[in-house]
Structure formats: structure tokens, C-alpha cells
Image (tube, rainbow, N blue to C red):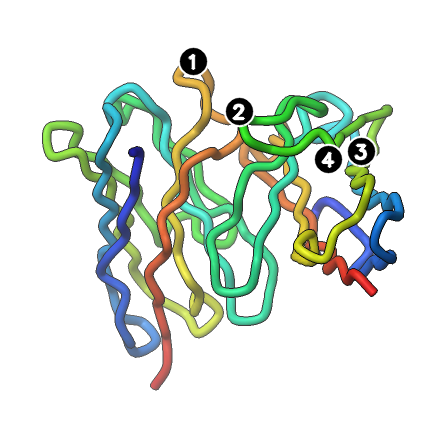
Amino acid sequence: EMQLVESGGVVVQPGGSLRLSCAASGFALEDYTMHWVRQAPGRGLEWVSLISWDGGTTYYADSVKGRFTVSRDNSKNSLYLQMNTLRTEDTALYYCAKVTNPNYYYYGLDVWGLGTTVTVSS
Amino acid sequence: QSVLTQPPSASGTPGQRVTISCSGSSSNIGSNYVYWYQQFPGTAPKLLIYRNNQRPSGVPDRFSGSKSGTSASLAISGLRSEDEADYYCAAWDDSLTGEVFGGGTKLTVL
């Protein structure tokens, strides 16, 4: 069974940093572009970032560009999101998700983790 | 404000057919595929429709998607109580170079 498990979410002060992790199992992470999507409490889904299968291509939402960095270690079947200069508006449940088709950066996201909660508050 | 526009709510009675609209622009829906996700409270989203009108394995054929120009729709026929959930449309946006979501539509089965 394909599975994604996020971790690393905590309470952090504004201006702080945090690194989220996403562990994959049941499929070859190295074959797929991976995405981060977040959901603020009581709000809708917001796309955050993507990283290509080899890490060579990354894209970010304008709201996080210059502050967040996505990376991956295929040898560890893991995906990461380094979050710097955190703001209160970054408070959300952060999901990692797998693209459906290995030949595309985006083709729908068919496997999602349960998410990890980041709270930015003083 | 979401890049894709959805009605915040929709409702129907069991057995009815309901549609949820999603409006975008030439840089997203107008030039790329549309995807639909279903999300129940406290759970992760689930891919419901991909490539405008394709259903992943296991999604009932009561769910169907369509696209015309810069708009798309999700139709649910034979509405059931278990369809009560939030529904999101999504598409790649060439101008933003990223995925964009609609604000979500909360479907209530009366």
C-alpha cells in the first residue's frame, strides 16, 4: 500500500524556522514529482511547492517563495520542506502528496499523507 | 481570494443531481486539465476526477467532470448522504507556475 507520513510540525514563534519531513512507503519515491499542500484551520487547500523526481526542478507559491525550500533524498525515500521566517499566516496543516503520473510535474495528486500541523504563534 | 472560483455551498436531496462550478482563466483552466478533490472533515483530500473527466479506480460513476473554456463542473448524480463533504477544483496555472485551487464547496445532503 502506498503511504505518506508527514512529521515535524510544532508550535514556533514568528520569525522562526522549521523543517517538515515526509516519509514514503509502498512505492518508489524516486519516480515521482512530489508536492506540499497546506490547509489553514477552517480554510481551503493552498498549494505550497513541488519538486521533480530528481530534485532538479522546484516551484513555489508566491506566498512562500524565498522563505521555504523543498528538497528530497530519494535514497531515504523522504521529502522535506524547510520553512524559514515563519509568519502567523503560515499556520496550517501541511500535507505532502504524490503526483499520479511520473511523467508530469502535475497530473493530480493521488496519494496524500495525514498531514502535520504547524502553528506559528508568540 | 482563490484563483479558481467555486460557490461556497451547494445542497441537494438524496437521489438528486447536483453540480458544482469552477471558474478560472486562460492561464489555468483555459489551457490545462482540471482536477477535483473530495475532502471529509478531519481527513486528507481524495482525488475524485483527473484530466477534466477521468475517474480514478474506485470512484463511482455517479461522479463526473466536464470542462468548457475557462470553466469546469463536477456533477454528482444519485446523491447520497455519504457524499456530504467539501469539494475542491484545481488546475495548473501557467502564469503563476504552480497549482491553484478553488476555495472549496461544502455540499450538504438535505
Task: Determine the chain carrying the residue at label 3.
Answer: B
| Mark 3, residue position | B72
| Mark 2, residue position | A107
Task: Tell whether A43 sits left or right of B72.
Answer: left
Query: Residue at (70%, 46%) from the top-left corner?
Result: B3
Question: Which of the numbered marks, if any, corresponds to residue B63?
Answer: 4
| Mark 1, residue position | A103
Q: Amino acid at mark 3?
A: Ala
Q: Position of residue A39 (x, y in %)?
A: 50, 60
The Cα atoms of the two marked residues, 3 and 2, are separated by 16 Å
Element on which disc 1 rests: loop
Q: Are marks 1 and 3 in contact (CB under 8 Å)?
A: no
Residue B6 versus residue A24 in the image, above or below: below
Quadrant of image for the C terminus of chain B? bottom right
The Cα atoms of the two marked residues, 2 and 4, are separated by 19 Å
Task: Determine the chain carrying the residue at label 4.
Answer: B
Task: Determine the chain carrying the residue at label 2.
Answer: A
Q: Are marks 4 and 1 in contact (CB under 8 Å)?
A: no
